[in-house]
Image: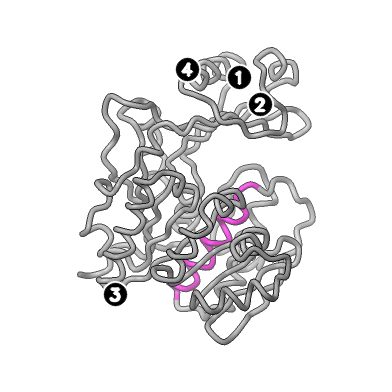
Amino acid sequence: MAVKYDVLGIGNAIMDVIAPVSDSFLTENDIQKSAMTLIDENRALELHKKLQAASNPQEIAGGSAANTLVGIAGLGVRGAYVGKVANDPLGTRFSTGMTSAGVDFTTQPLLNQDATARCLIAVTEDGERSMNTFLGASVRFSPRDILKSQIQSAGIIYLEGYLFDQDEAKAAFVKASEIAQAAGRKVSLTLSDLFCVDRHRQSFKHLIKHHVDILFANESELLSLYETDDFDAAVTALRQDCKIACVTRSSKGSIVIEEDRVHPIPAIWVDDLIDTTGAGDQYAAGVLSGHVMGMDWAEAGYLGSVCAAEVIAHYGARPETCIHQLIVTG
């Protein structure tokens, strides 16, 4: 089958609802400042209405893998996304948001069950983000949402570790990986979060060793994966399990492991660091896009650094600068 998509992402489909508020709004609505709190549907719907009444919220189709795919599309690479939303107005706006960003999104919505997931982000005048997240329909993702023809049509599938908390989603990951491997496609995984690794360490190790061609992790996730405080020891262990791995190290930059070689990638200096949200997502977008464009892994890693630097220089998890400016700046 011919490649229709260069990268197809699979992850939690979450609508980000971002609103400027006062500190008193947080107090009045029992929102813990600068924290991320998981909430139920009733609380999500209530807070959503209050944010709409208090300000003019910005709605952005989000989630980690979704942000990566939007970054990939912005780099001129063909992308698609698979994630679960509900058959509700917010789900419709999520779908519209992805397609308008240049990412194909055709997953069938969930009917008559949980509402579309949302992350309600209250931003106070000091720039602090206080998040209340309802996972809703996103965690209803299952093997039934994996379409063989869609996976076979993608050069690389990109799996979001956040989705790994549900058994059905784990099964979907394995199904997608097996279809991709049988079709001669590549499988990429991001570990997503330190706590994800702590919860699913053995499952992640099995997936990485048997199904993953390209791994993304940050330093703390890598150390947790191999249960060590020694970064070099963790890298040595990782090289035994995965051919290609990209490990971000904040201000230290990143490394790209290519079988028997380790490429150090410098961080790109940013004069004003505004918001680190989405840095890892856009780093992955740059690396995967660079690989698709024919760059070697060191060059792709550098493009990842450029993309990460762009996104931390402004609020939000998505790039605001076109590819041509990114390349020139980088």
Q: Earlier in the sequence, mark 3 or mark 4?
A: 4
- Judged from the image, the secondary structure of the residue bearing numbered disc 2 is strand
* Region in magenta: 277-293
Please tell me which of labels 1 and 3 falls first in the chain.
1
The residue at 27%/47% (across/down) is: 145
Could you tell me residue 108's position as x and y percent? Answer: 26, 40
Q: Residue at x 42, y 60 (%)?
A: 158
Residue 2: x and y, percent?
23, 70
Find disc 1 in the rendering and name its residue.
Answer: 55
Residue at mark 4 to residue at mark 2: CA–CA distance: 22 Å
Residue at the disc numbered 3:
184
Considering only order in the chain, which callout, 2 or 3, is on the residue closer to the N terminus? Answer: 2
Residue 289 lies in magenta, yes or no? yes
Q: Residue at x 73, y 20 (%)?
A: 22
Q: Dot 3: within a 10 Å radius of its alpha carbon, few (fewer than 14), some, or many (20 or more) residues?
A: few
Report how far apart the C-alphas of labels 3 and 4 lie in the structure.
45 Å
Quarter of the figure with residue 292: bottom left
N-terminal of the two: label 2 or label 1? 2
